[in-house]
């Protein structure tokens, strides 16, 4: 989302009491650079880390800190602030502050103003990794995510102030500003539904062995995050990849190719875009043993059968439909990459395909970077390289430039 949509918009920055409170100073400045009008509210704990005078100097306006102060509350300052604003950004959102927001409490300048505020809210968490991962914190986060008014920016993972390593670090200020812009502006995918597949599938031989691949789902999840930031409502049908950040996404967990096909086919007719980035197993064992097969009992020949082609079946289902979604595939290849990608583009009747050579360093499974070529049915070609989020943003930029499908044409 272009931060210029913040020009002239009215934003409250609510500062919580954590060591990351000093970064809220930079946040105020960056929001102002984007053109926003900024006012600040602080909790009592926040004042232990940064003085209200600092935020007053940065914002150019008095800071709301105490709703028992007659100079601040003589005219119901927290209500006036809530009525004035179009967006509320809480940074840092500590574990305590998130819990109190979820509970609807109003015990300080931030929570009181927030409870009176009716618009969109961006929460930027910052806390120790153990506090972030605590089940109670995650329950509070899930409850707030379920409310469409609230979105989360971060937290990031890395070295924390206490010396621990893990999730809990305040996300970069530019990312908070981007999330603010996405919430207050009308992104190009606002009102659109995007369905994605991500990760691997597993095809079990017996209860302990399976056929799979090294996919981690990072590329698909980067696409999901980029689409969400452009305003889309995103559903991810996700293979087994372990713990991931599900903030702002509807995630449907699956295991096998048949599971993934079932979930996709039940949804694909109701979406605007379908992006199939999952690495789906092409074969499964013909039979699955109910118990672990012992070494001495293992067959000399393992008979395999084809799994459903999720993208091909989805393409057939929506072909000729009055409301055909944009269809995008992925081609992870090891040779003749563009030749195979173009063949898949035509055979599956796609609008675009993303091709990459998984043998190239920094472009294969499990990396944080990627190097891809995007081909469209209309002849557009775009080469992209960078972090997977940067590549995802480039892919979506190209897809937004494609002409819409002709209703009933199958394309």
Image (cartoon, grey):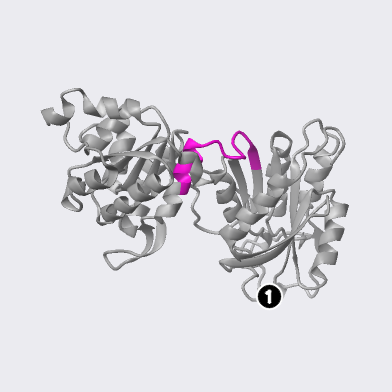
Horizontal side of residue 17 vs 308, given as left or right: left
Q: Residue at x 17, y 43 (%)?
A: 44
- Secondary structure beneath dot 1 equals loop
Residue 85 locus on image (x, y percent): 36, 31
Work out whether 174 lies above or below 140. below
| Residue toward you, 342 or 173 | 173
In this picture, which residue range is highlighted in magenta? Answer: 178-194
Residue 248 locus on image (x, y percent): 50, 43
Q: Residue at x 50, y 48 (%)?
A: 246
| Residue toward you, 217 or 65 | 65
- Residue 239 shows in this picture: no
Residue 139 locus on image (x, y percent): 38, 43
Horizontal side of residue 2 vs 84, given as left or right: right
| Residue toward you, 319 or 123 | 123
Which residue is under mark 1?
360
Q: Residue at x 49, y 46 (%)?
A: 3
Q: Residue at x 28, y 31 (%)?
A: 113
Q: Quadrant of residue 35?
A: top left
Work out whether 243 lies above or below 234. below
Let me know if residue 127 is in the magenta part: no
Let me know if residue 186 is in the magenta part: yes
Horizontal side of residue 68 vs 263, given as left or right: left
Split into 4 quadrants, where in the image is the C terminus? top right
């Amino acid at each position: 989302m272009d931060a210029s949509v913040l020009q002239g918009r009215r934003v409250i920055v609510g500062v919580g009491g954590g060591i990351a409170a000093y970064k809220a100073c930079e946040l105020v400045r960056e929001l102002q650079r984007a053109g926003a009008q900024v006012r600040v509210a602080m909790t009592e704990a926040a004042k232990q880390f940064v003085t209200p005078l600092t935020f007053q100097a940065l914002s150019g306006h008095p800071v709301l800190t105490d709703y028992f102060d007659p100079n601040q509350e003589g005219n119901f300052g927290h209500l006036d602030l809530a009525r004035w604003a179009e967006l509320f950004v809480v940074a840092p959102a500590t574990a305590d502050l998130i819990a109190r927001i979820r509970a609807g409490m109003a015990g300080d300048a931030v929570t009181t103003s927030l409870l009176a505020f009716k618009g969109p809210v961006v929460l930027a968490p910052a806390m120790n990794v153990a506090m972030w991962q605590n089940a109670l914190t995650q329950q509070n986060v899930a409850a707030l995510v379920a409310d469409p008014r609230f979105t989360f920016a971060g937290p990031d993972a890395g070295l924390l102030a206490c010396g621990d390593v893990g999730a809990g670090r305040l996300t970069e200020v530019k990312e908070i500003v981007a999330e603010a812009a996405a919430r207050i502006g009308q992104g190009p995918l606002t009102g659109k539904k995007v369905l994605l597949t991500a990760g691997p599938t597993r095809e079990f031989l017996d209860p302990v062995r399976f056929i799979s691949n090294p996919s981690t789902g990072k590329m698909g999840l980067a696409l999901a995050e980029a689409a969400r930031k452009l305003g889309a409502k995103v559903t991810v049908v996700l293979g087994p990849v372990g713990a991931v950040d599900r903030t702002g996404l509807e995630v449907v967990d699956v295991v096998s190719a048949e599971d993934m096909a079932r979930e996709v086919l039940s949804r694909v007719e109701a979406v605007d875009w379908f992006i199939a980035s999952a690495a789906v197993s092409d074969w499964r064992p013909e039979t699955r043993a109910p118990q672990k097969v012992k070494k001495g009992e293992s067959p000399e020949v393992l008979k395999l059968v084809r799994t459903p082609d999720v993208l091909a079946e989805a393409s057939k289902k929506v072909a000729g439909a009055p409301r055909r979604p944009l269809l995008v595939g992925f081609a992870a290849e090891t040779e003749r990459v563009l030749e195979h990608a173009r063949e898949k583009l035509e055979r599956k009747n796609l609008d675009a395909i993303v091709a990459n050579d998984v043998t190239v360093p920094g472009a294969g499974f499990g990396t944080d970077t990627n190097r891809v070529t995007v081909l469209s049915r209309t002849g557009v070609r775009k080469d992209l390289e960078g972090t997977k989020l940067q590549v995802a943003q480039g892919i979506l930029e190209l897809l937004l430039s494609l002409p819409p499908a002709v209703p009933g044409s199958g394309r």
